[in-house]
Amino acid sequence: MRKVTQKIVTAFAQGKPAASGNTTTDGNAIWLHGNRIAQREEDGSVWVTLAGWPTVTTRERINGLCEELCVGFRIYQRNHAQILTYRDSNLAQDIDSNEKVYVNMGQSFNITEADRQA
């Protein structure tokens, strides 16, 4: 994990503000180049999105956050498609670069149909 990512995701997990290079957090959301890529909801759930920018850096920030929060998935790219993969399984799912993936802290995640439409 890059130092920038480590600093930001640690601050986010602790609910503290931080900034490093092109990435910032207020403790409740993470922005990369001004695009919100993660948000903590009032119920404690967290969603992540590529925010329309399926870049190596965006995936690295999201994967760093997933690692910090101990959720069991990662996002990678295969044949220009964004793939959500699940730890300890062979399951993988294509996701849209604007899709929100909701994470139940340390539990599981789901993608709602409403978010697919949004």
Image: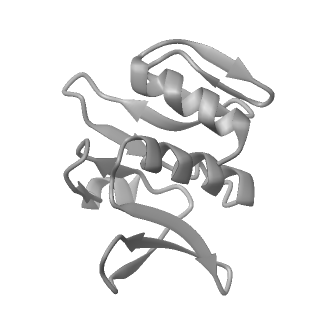
Residue at left offset 68%, top offset 54%: 53
Residue 61 picture location, percent across and down: 61, 46
One can see residue 93 in this view: yes
Relative placement, left or right, of 79 versus 11 is right
Query: Against 79, is 1 above or below?
Result: above
Residue 88 figure quarter: bottom left
Residue at left offset 47%, top offset 25%: 12
Residue at left offset 30%, top offset 81%: 89
Query: Against 110, is 105 above or below?
Result: above
Residue at left offset 30%, top offset 48%: 103
Query: Against 116, is 4 above or below?
Result: above
Residue 54 picture location, percent across and down: 66, 61
Task: Give whichever of 95, 26 is nearer the camera.
Answer: 26
Residue 113 figure quarter: bottom left
- Number of callouts: 0
Relative placement, left or right, of 110 versus 31 is left
In this view, the residue farthest toward the right is 21
Residue 50 picture location, percent across and down: 57, 52
Query: Against 16, is 60 above or below?
Result: below
Colouring method of the image? one colour
Residue 102 picture location, percent across and down: 31, 49
Task: Give whichever of 112, 33 is nearer the camera.
Answer: 33
One can see residue 29 in this view: no
Residue 35 figure quarter: top right
